[in-house]
Amino acid sequence: MSALIEFQNVCFRYTEGRRDILKNLSLSVEAGDFVAVLGHNGSGKSTLAKHINAILLPTEGKVTVAGLDTSVEDNLPAIRRTAGMVFQNPDNQIIATMVEEDVAFALENLGVPHDEMVKRVDEALDSVGMLEFKKYATTKLSGGQKQRIAIAGVTAMRPDIIVFDEPTAMLDPQGREDVINIAKKLNEQGITVIYITHYMEEAAQAKRIVVLNDGEILLDGTPHYVFQNAGLLTSVGLDVPQSTSLMFLLRSHGIKVPLAVLNEEECVSVLSDILTRKNQT
Amino acid sequence: MNPILKTENLRYVYGAGTPFEKVAVDNINLEIFEDEFIGVIGRTGSGKSTLIQHFNGILRPTSGKVYYDGNDCWAKGFSRNSLRFNVGLVFQYPEYQLFEETVEKDIAFGPSNMGLSADEIEKRIRDSLRFVGLDESIRKSSPFEISGGQKRRVAIAGIMAMNPKVLILDEPTAGLDPRGRDEILQRISEYRAEKKSTVIIVSHNMEDISRVCGKVLVMRKAQVEMFAPVDEVFERSAELCSMGLNVPQITRVFISLKEKGFDVPSSVYTPAQACSAVIKAIGGDGT
Amino acid sequence: MIKDITIGQYFPGDSVIHRLDPRVKIVLTLLYIAFLFIIQTAATYVFALAVTVFFVILTKIPLKMYLRGLKPLLFILIFTAFLNVFYSTGEPLFQFWIFTVTLQGIKNAVFMILRIFMLVISTSMLTYTTSPIVLTGGLERLLSPLAKIRLPVHEFSMMMTIALRFIPTLLEETDKIMNAQKARGADFETGGLIKRAKALAPILIPLFISAFRRADDLATAMECRCYTGSGEGRTHYVTYSMSASDYAAIGIMIVIIAVAILLNFVTVMGF
């Protein structure tokens, strides 16, 4: 029994003779996981994402999604239904003029009967907190709201996997927070999430982080494990959350702190401990 | 000393007289001096972008005044074309405005509109490429065949090449990876240090602003909420947080610590500052 | 600003006419236009005018808006009126120089103006009261039988939908690029024709590149959402079901046309 998403020795290049964007990459993702993919611009993140629902096909190697080989043309409809995708630019993935019609687009394509469709559109809009905008013109929404509509358009298909390809790169902080929270919620409901981002604080919220560098996997593990490699991350143009770098600094000053500190809460509790201890002595 | 840019009761209304009427900025009174490095922050729709488009005469105030170097920008006889050369504005995602066949031609677009000599234009191209950290070898490349980060830099170079007295950048780091972000900010700082020009950066990212700017302008609901040196603004970080602004993670940590009753400073926004604050608080000598 | 242009000329509202099924509206408008071409007598014109005004009132959109649509046609109106007045045969009313004005001529001119006037109002009524998206949807459903003879009805409708969706986006983008180039000292307002045409390159090139990029992104996004390019096996989210007022509208229109034909016939005989 193979994993939900399986990359087996995948190489990818656009044309023969040009450089490999993915180099002999193997990766498997189990159902229910939340995998953040980090990497600098041009590291192959988006290319990896586009392999999951067969927009791109491996030059060498094999990708399977729910056991289906992406290179078999007959598998395409099933793969697209299983793995939905949300893209970076919210403006370029909205097809209809009206919110509800856009969410219904995939369902129309799948030939879902009308009554069922109405139900699923409402459900999907509700799951991203946009039900009240059902009758709005899509062009009148903010970037963050458009992105939520795009997510609803995908969840309406009831996919097992959603691939987010830098969904927050063009959003303001509020929109970013909304999108990552929705992704987490969908994951709790059982959807497997692949989340590509430049933001370390977003990646820190995943269950697993895969760091790509020049088409190869550099690090793969829990956020706590990955962010302990601060030096390695900065050497490939990435970063660690501020809390983590504070821990590194404190360590270098001889203060004993755990390195695996990723977010505000963990950092506050570690610092509270240090400060309380001091006051007691 | 006279301010290089000044606004007086500036107000701008979008779609006046239509059902979509919206006051974008209101009652703005600002003085910006030569050599200042200002960060503008605020939520989407707070009026940041509208405000900066008044500084180079792209937008005309609905009421109120904008002065450049003491002159009313909308008075008769004032040349707004020369205003645009004096106040260089880099829009959001500026790479989408590139259009020439080669990088050098694109950078030359502004300078040649200024009517500069070929020699001078050549010099401007070389200087601005150096400012944004691009190699001379890129000059003959098509601006559509270079990487995203390089495109962004070419677009910024195109404005720097006009040698503006004031350089304004709207979200210059949007969509870049951490290294790209650092690089761009670093380059802008160096440019400012060498040129001694006024620089204004609009950003959602307080971390970016705290790293390079001297003063912060906080916009809220079409109005100026704060305009003060970085440390003073971060002193009020709890307020910034409640305004829904995105303050750095480490700042939020220190707000929480303070709320828990610990005696820590509230103006902390980098891990280095946080580290020395912690060491000071526990009375350590940092060994 | 460029984005202030209202495309599609739709006036949102909730009148009886707004709520009619778009298919019914399209068919009735076509019928009405056909009817405008068969009427011949003064009495029928008066009747048609009354009917038109009645519908205008029902839409709750000010008459002013409809008249605005006539403005670009003013020249054609005057020109046809002129031709009709002077080049009609019949009893000469009076004469000067080489022109002969006949009663028939004046009558023809007035009729012609009224016909164009009503034509413009009835077509405007369709676009004013039906949002472009609903209009395309209605059109697709009406034309769907043609798909059986292999006409690309679905493709046409998808094209319209996407065009409508992207017009505001591209207008906004044009505005943005124009401002960005202005900030680099581009001058779009002065100079001769050639200079101005050349000045457009810094706007058009980025705009085209961006449009292609968007098209590419959109195509991928559509594929990801299981779009296969054919209308086969697709269902529709927006459905149209005829309500009582739609049947009433059809009934009223039949009565109106019947009355008009009768009136036309009677008065033609009478003259």
Image (tube, rainbow, N blue to C red):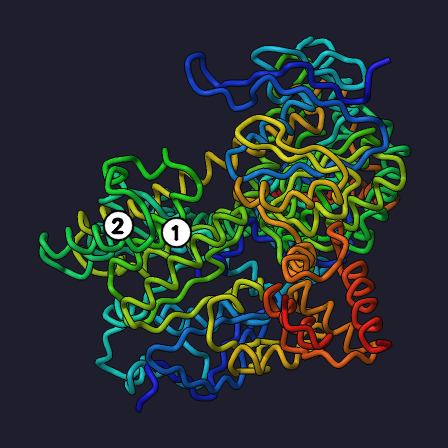
Q: In which quadrant of the rendered image does the C terminus of chain A lie? A: bottom right
Residue name at image x 29 percent, y 72 percent: B196
User: Horizontal and vertical percent for residue A19?
Assistant: 45, 20
Q: Which of A243 and A64 is in front in this view?
A: A243
Q: Quadrant of residue B22?
A: bottom right
Viewer-proximal residue among C200 and B231:
B231
| Extreme residue toward the bottom, this view | B1
**Residue identified by numbered label 1:** C81
Q: Do the residues labelled 1 and 2 touch (CB within 8 Å)?
A: no
Between residue A69 and residue B285, name the one nearer to us: B285
- For numbered disc 2, what is the local secondary structure? helix
Q: Marks 1/2: CA distance?
A: 58 Å
In the rendered view, tell whether residue B200 sits above or below residue A23.
Answer: below
Q: Is residue B139 left or right of residue A268?
A: left
- In the foreground, A102 or A127: A127
Q: Mark 2 points at which residue?
A: B107
Q: In the displayed structure, would residue B205 be above or below residue C73?
A: below
Secondary structure found at label 1? helix
**Which quadrant of the structure image shows residue A47?**
top right
In the rendered image, the quadrant that contains the N terminus of chain A is: top right
Q: Position of residue B43 (x, y in %)?
A: 62, 67
